[in-house]
Amino acid sequence: ALSEIQRVLKPGGRVVVAHSDARENIHDGHTAAGGAVAKDVLPCKKGMFSLMRAAGFSEARVDETSDSYLAFGMKPKQV
């Protein structure tokens, strides 16, 4: 999904993944909901950073705390 987001963004465009809860709580909620989101998980900080960089985002940053998850990336201005 990140590669497709990067593809359709204009140069300098940004992607943000933000949750106002801890990653583990998001996982628990998805599992409890079942269905289409039952196996959806947010990668750990290092994993998300690697995915963002592999998709071609520059200035990738991931912050994870006990009550939030934030990942940010920018498509390079010169592609």
Image (cartoon, rainbow, N blue to C red):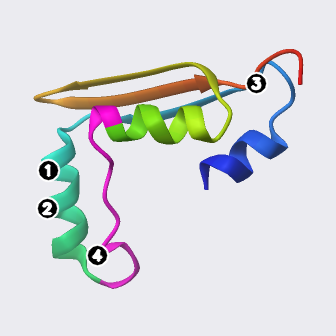
Q: What residue type is labelled 4?
A: Ala
At horizontal 25% and vertical 66% (from top left) the residue drawn is 30
For the residues labelled 4 and 1, the Cα–Cα distance comes to 13 Å
Q: Which image quadrant for residue 45?
A: top left
Residue position for label 1: 25
| Disc 4, SS | loop
Q: Please check the rendered image and state whether residue 38 is part of the magenta-colored stretch, yes or no.
A: yes
Residue 38, numbered circle: 4
At horizontal 68% and vertical 33% (from top left) the residue drawn is 56
18 with respect to 1 (left or right) = left
4 with respect to 39 (left or right) = right
| Disc 2, SS | helix
**Is residue 14 shown above or below 32?**
above
The image quadrant where one finds the C terminus is top right
For the residues labelled 2 and 1, the Cα–Cα distance comes to 5 Å
Confirm or deny contact between disc 2 and disc 1 (CB under 8 A): yes
Confirm or deny contact between disc 4 and disc 3 (CB under 8 A): no
Residue position for label 2: 28
The magenta span reads 35-46
Q: Which image quadrant for residue 61?
A: top left
28 with respect to 13 (left or right) = left
* Residue toward you, 32 or 12: 12
Q: What residue type is labelled 2?
A: Asp
**Is residue 27 shown above or below 38?**
above
At horizontal 54% and vertical 36% (from top left) the residue drawn is 52
Along the polypeptide, which appears first: circle 4 or circle 1? 1
Along the polypeptide, which appears first: circle 3 or circle 1? 3
**Is residue 67 shown above or below 77?**
below
For the residues labelled 3 and 1, the Cα–Cα distance comes to 29 Å
Residue lying farthest to the bottom in this orientation: 35
Along the polypeptide, which appears first: circle 3 or circle 2? 3
Along the polypeptide, which appears first: circle 4 or circle 3? 3
